[in-house]
């Protein structure tokens, strides 16, 4: 009867039984040669984990919101809703215009009869106070019909083609935030409107008061650029800006650009942009004009707290800048080929401390 000793462990890599070490992590045996290779492999895995950690830290410092699927859905919903609203508004405008033309023809016929009656009564000197009152009343009715035809009625449908979207915060997260901060969440409004706001920005600019106020905070006094959240392709729209503060000399640009062009530095000099800037400068599809006599624009007359209206007239393919305090207006035509629809407003702040507020729709 022969006795056999305990069986030797073998290296999982080469199968040899000499110089065996057992890894406490994976519980596998390795020879002297391959235990070093196994350790190097573990070091490589650690390096990969550290790289993942660095990437996560970078995401925490500079969160990439564009990758967020919820934000993507919100942005798409906003674009779809704006498109539906613009289509509905254009249909309503077209229908109203047709009604106005039809009403004009009908009123013209009645007007001719009244005019003939007036002429004949005047020549015959045959009229009284009763006739005068009736003619005045009839003319007033015709004037009202021209301005707002009785056949046109604006109806607000309860079942709108645009649904509301609301971001809900689950109760567990609310409780966690309340426990860590000692306060609850502020309630947000459920109302959806078409009020313009600052949305896209380039440069060191602070957007506050729920998107209505933009302030230049770049200590280097470089230009900062802002665009709104709405796009315009039909009709006429007015956006009111309050110049809350600016550093002399005035270096604020107000105008529009094609939404198909990315927001970038010196965009006001490109052919896709039209508007008014400091130093009496007017930019029109890549051309700069500083002739006040020709343009009627004097940037030096703008003061803090002045309100400027930017009118985007897509129908006439032009924009206007109306100064409420001075009651003056400047108009620029827009080359649709160089600045194709849809348009977005463009605000550029030139100096640190410059501040512009979007006022509520009138």
Image (cartoon, rainbow, N blue to C red):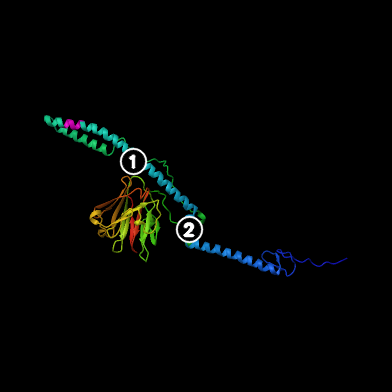
Q: Residues within 10 Å of mark 2 (few under 14, many from 20)?
A: few
* Label whose residue precedes the other's in the sequence (2 or 1): 2
Q: Residues within 10 Å of mark 1 (few under 14, many from 20)?
A: some
Q: Position of residue 113 (x, y in %)?
A: 20, 30
The stretch drawn in magenta includes residue 196: no
Disc ID at residue 64? 2
Q: Is residue 90 above or below residue 294?
A: above
Disc ID at residue 355? none
Q: Is residue 77 above or below residue 352?
A: above
At x 42%, y 48%, the residue is 79
Q: Say whether residue 354 is left or right of residue 31.
A: left
Q: Say whether residue 329 is left or right of residue 339.
A: left
Would you say the residues marked 2 and 1 are in contact, meaning their CB atoms lie under 8 Å apart?
no
Q: Is residue 139 above or below residue 5?
A: above
Q: Position of residue 307 (x, y in %)?
A: 29, 55
Disc ID at residue 93? 1
Q: Assign the magenta stretch its main secondary structure.
A: helix
Q: Quadrant of the N terminus?
A: bottom right
At x 43%, y 46%, the residue is 80
Magenta residues (range): 113-118
Q: Residue furthest left?
A: 125
Q: Say whether residue 332 is left or right of residue 258.
A: left
Q: Is residue 139 above or below residue 174?
A: above
* Residue nearest the viewer, comparing 77 with 105: 105
Q: Number of numbered discs present?
A: 2
Tag 2's secondary structure? loop
The stretch drawn in magenta includes residue 116: yes
């Amino acid at each position: 009867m022969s006795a056999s000793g305990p069986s030797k462990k073998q290296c999982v890599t080469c199968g040899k039984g000499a110089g065996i070490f057992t890894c406490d992590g994976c519980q596998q045996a390795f020879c002297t040669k391959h235990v070093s290779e196994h350790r190097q492999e573990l070091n490589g895995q650690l390096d990969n984990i550290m790289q993942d950690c660095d990437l996560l830290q970078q995401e925490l410092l500079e969160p990439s919101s564009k990758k967020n699927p919820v934000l993507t859905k919100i942005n798409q919903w906003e674009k779809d809703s704006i498109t539906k609203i613009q289509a509905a508004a254009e249909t309503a405008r077209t229908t109203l215009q047709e009604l106005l033309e039809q009403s004009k023809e009908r009123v013209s016929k009645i007007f001719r009869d009244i005019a003939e009656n007036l002429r004949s009564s005047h020549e015959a000197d045959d009229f009284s106070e009763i006739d005068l009152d009736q003619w005045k009343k009839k003319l007033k009715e015709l004037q009202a019909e021209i301005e707002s035809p009785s056949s046109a009625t604006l109806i607000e449908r309860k079942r709108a083609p645009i649904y509301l979207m609301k971001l809900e915060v689950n109760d567990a997260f609310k409780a966690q935030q309340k426990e860590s901060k000692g306060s609850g969440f502020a309630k947000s409004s459920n109302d959806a409107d078409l009020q313009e706001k600052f949305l896209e920005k380039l440069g060191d600019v602070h957007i506050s008061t729920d998107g209505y106020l933009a302030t230049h905070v770049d200590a280097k006094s470089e230009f900062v650029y802002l665009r709104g959240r709405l796009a315009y392709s039909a009709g006429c729209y007015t956006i009111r800006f309050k110049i809350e503060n600016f550093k002399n000399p005035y270096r604020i640009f107000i105008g529009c650009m094609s939404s198909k062009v990315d927001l970038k530095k010196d965009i006001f000099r490109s052919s896709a942009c039209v508007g008014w800037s400091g130093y009496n400068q007017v930019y029109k599809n890549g051309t700069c004009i500083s002739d006040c006599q020709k343009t009627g624009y004097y940037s030096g007359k703008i003061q803090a707290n002045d309100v400027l209206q930017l009118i985007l007239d897509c129908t006439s393919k032009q924009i206007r800048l109306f100064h409420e305090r001075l009651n003056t207006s400047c108009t620029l035509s827009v080359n649709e080929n160089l600045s194709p629809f849809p348009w977005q407003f463009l605000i550029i702040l030139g100096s640190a401390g410059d501040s512009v507020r979007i006022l509520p729709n009138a």
